[in-house]
Image (cartoon, grey):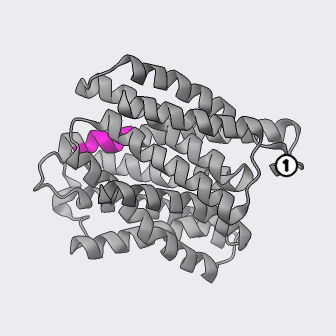
Amino acid sequence: MIYLLASIVLNSYLTLSFKVLQRLHINTLQAIVFNYVACVATGSVFNGAYPVNSTNIGAPWMIWAVVMGAMFISIFNVIGATAQKIGVAVASVANKLSLVIPFIFSLYLYHETNTFLKTTGIIVALTAVVFTCLPAEKNNNSVTGNSRQLLLLLPVVLFISSGLLDTLIVYVKNIFFNNPADNFNDFLITAFSVAACIGLLLMGIQLITGKQQFSMKALLAGIIIGIPNYFSIWALGKVISLYHGNSSAIIPVNNMGVVLFSAVMAWILFREKLSLINWLGIGLAIAAIALIAYG
């Protein structure tokens, strides 16, 4: 239970942190890049060593670490854009309702049990995504026309990509790190290293071309975000291990907690304005996750 609670709180913290970056006018890209550098440093200290070596480079999971690293930094940027341009609650729901995707893959790949309630939950979840993807008018008075339509794509992209990432985490954990003696940290740190390298390359190009200037505030923000970010994935991995063979329920329970905690904290800390249909979407999201988790 402690790992599940840690995963919920830390994942919510990551979504909320993007709103803070916006309020403090901190460069989001640089903060994300330094966040992954901090993840690598944190993981290496926690692991006792930096795992990218000649032995692990030839490991069967290495290609998946590269794929996950690229997904990490891409999705983090989408989360940041969604949270800042539409709202924390919408970003949280679109991100965490992606549980539909790993749920389906869990049934197909691992032959986990399906029920009528779980199937109903899938349908309700998809409806909730549509409702929560509609930005409240009060949050987007200056956004019209094509720009508004493009904004609507952000939560959809986030929904699909986050679902595929959750699916990949479960797959790698079940296939390559099913034995308690296996070191999942090696894989995790390697994936974060890939994300950091991609980010540093992109940021370096921006700095060299003069499109950005180095920000010390972004460096500090990256460290503050990066340490919890590492442990958010690590905690989720621990939960999957403890409840092996039941990922179709664990991921929804985890995501339900993140949706609730993020929405409440966004309302308390940032006084986010949500339309009636947004609130209806959040309510349907909670109902959907409950149906899937307990069905």
Magenta segment includes 241: no
Residue identifier under label 1: 138
Q: Hey, which residue is sitting farthest bottom in the picture?
A: 216
On the rendered image, what quadrant is the C terminus found in? top left
In the displayed structure, 289 sits above or below 20; it is: above
Q: What is the quadrant of residue 80 in the picture?
A: bottom right
Residue 41 or 66: which is nearer the viewer? Answer: 41
Residue 156: x %, y % from top left: 61, 35
Left or right of residue 168, residue 217 in this image: right
In the displayed structure, 101 sits above or below 211; it is: above
Q: Is residue 263 in sight in this rendering? A: yes
Residue 275: x %, y % from top left: 77, 41
Residue 175: x %, y % from top left: 20, 40
Q: Residue at x 22, y 35 (%)?
A: 245
On the rendered image, what quadrant is the N terminus found in? bottom left
Residue 81 or 286: which is nearer the viewer? Answer: 286
Q: What is the quadrant of residue 107 in the picture?
A: top left
Q: Residue at x 55, y 25 (%)?
A: 124
Local packing at callout 1 (Cα closer than 10 Å; few below 14, some 14-19, many 20+) is: few
